Amino acid sequence: MGSAPTPEFNLSSAKATQRWGYVKKGINPDEAIILSCEDNFHGRSIAIVSMSTDPDAKTNFGPYLKNVGPIIPGTDNQVLRYGKIEDVELAFRNAGDKIAAILIEPIQGEAGIVVPPKDYFEKVKALCKAYNVLLIADEIQTGIARTGKMLCWEHYLSRENKPDMVLLGKAISGGVLPVSAVLSSREIMSVLEPGSHGSTYGGNALASRVAIEALAVVKDEKLVERSKEYGHFFQEELKKLAAESNGIIKEVRGLGLLCAIVVDNTKTNGKSAWDLCLLMKDHGVLAKPTHEHIIRLAPPLVISKEDLLKGVDSIRQALIELPNAKPVAH
Ligand SMILES: Cc1ncc(COP(=O)(O)O)c(C=O)c1O
């Protein structure tokens, strides 16, 4: 199912999941739960911000949807932490019969490019199978070659054990038209019968054509392979930069061309990642901090090695200027 802006499709996936919970799993009416993780970002619709733990996304938008989000059922508001399998175990043990799905980013993007432990998804999938819970991978940021695989879950899971549902947006249309998609099996999606769900712009022919072309470009130009090779190259260069940064860059992390540098705020003479981003802009690199100390770097998949090196050099120049820069409020 595809071709409408992302919020529409996150909603479609939530509706299909809830309905699957009642029709296929046999959950009692109005008791279905969709779990998510702490610090998630899945969008801005009411259904989705109901799952959020970010006050900026959530404050004063209530009332929120019930039974969705990162609170572990049967606990005193204990939050389900990303990457901690024991939290998923506890949630499923406490309410596995009511949980329709767990929605997870294969790398938490807005939270600061947080890569989970290598075996996390495999263990979550095994629990999902044991408790008949759908595993939904939100690949809206990580999908379509960004991390050196076509879809990021391929880093963690085999095809036989793939997620039950995958959400795509952003790069699926090359950013040209608003297109997003929910990928799942016929068995799961058939719970949405004709008339039960839809939208004026759903299945938009022009947008679908654009997405088909954008995907052909990804294939023809070998952008998956490129993201893997160039991402490795970029991260190695960033690690060299970190080694010469007097500890200002305390970590480089990510997969493929989705990475982040983590700034040690105690070594910056009171300057923030935001100040560093402003200096980087002056040197020709646009990037956005997530939190006070993490800068996400997601260069275009078609970038050359020469331009990646220029980018690293711009960050180097910005780091030299950072201690004496004027702090800017934001
Ligand atoms: C993982 C993830 N899911 C969902 C969204 C929401 O996408 P949109 O802004 O197109 O609604 C984003 C946006 O950054 C995202 O990173």
Image (spheres, rainbow, N blue to C red):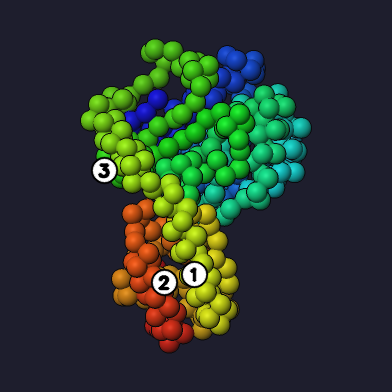
Disc tally is: 3
- Secondary structure under tag 2 reads helix
Label 2, residues with CA under 10 Å away: few <14, some 14-19, many ≥20: some
Q: Is residue 50 visible?
A: no
Q: Nearer the viewer, residue 189 or 298?
A: 298
Please state the horizontal and vertical placement of residue 123, each as a whole percent of the image.
70, 39
- Direction from residue 113 to residue 176 in the image, left or right: left
Q: Nearer the viewer, residue 181 or 225?
A: 225
Q: Is residue 317 visible?
A: yes
Residue 238's disc is 1
The answer to the question of whether label 1 and label 2 lie on touching residues, with beta carbons closer than 8 A, is yes
Q: Nearer the viewer, residue 27 or 320?
A: 320
Please state the horizontal and vertical placement of residue 113, each as a whole percent of the image.
52, 56
Residue behind mark 3: 176
Residue type at the position of mark 2: Val
- Secondary structure under tag 3 reads loop
Residue type at the position of mark 3: Val
* Quarter of the rendering occupied by the N terminus: top left
- Which mark is in front, 2 or 3? 2
Residue 312's disc is 2
Give the CA separation, mark 3 to mark 1: 30 Å
Give the CA separation, mark 2 to mark 3: 28 Å
Please state the horizontal and vertical placement of residue 214, each as a whole percent of the image.
30, 40
- Secondary structure under tag 1 reads helix
Mark closest to the chain's N terminus, 2 or 3: 3
Query: Looking at the image, which residue is at 67% across and 30% down?
Result: 128
Residue at disc 2, CB closer than 8 Å to ligand 1: no
Mark closest to the chain's N terminus, 3 or 1: 3
Query: Looking at the image, which residue is at 71% across and 36% down?
Result: 91
For residue 315, above or below residue 133:
below
Residue type at the position of mark 1: Leu
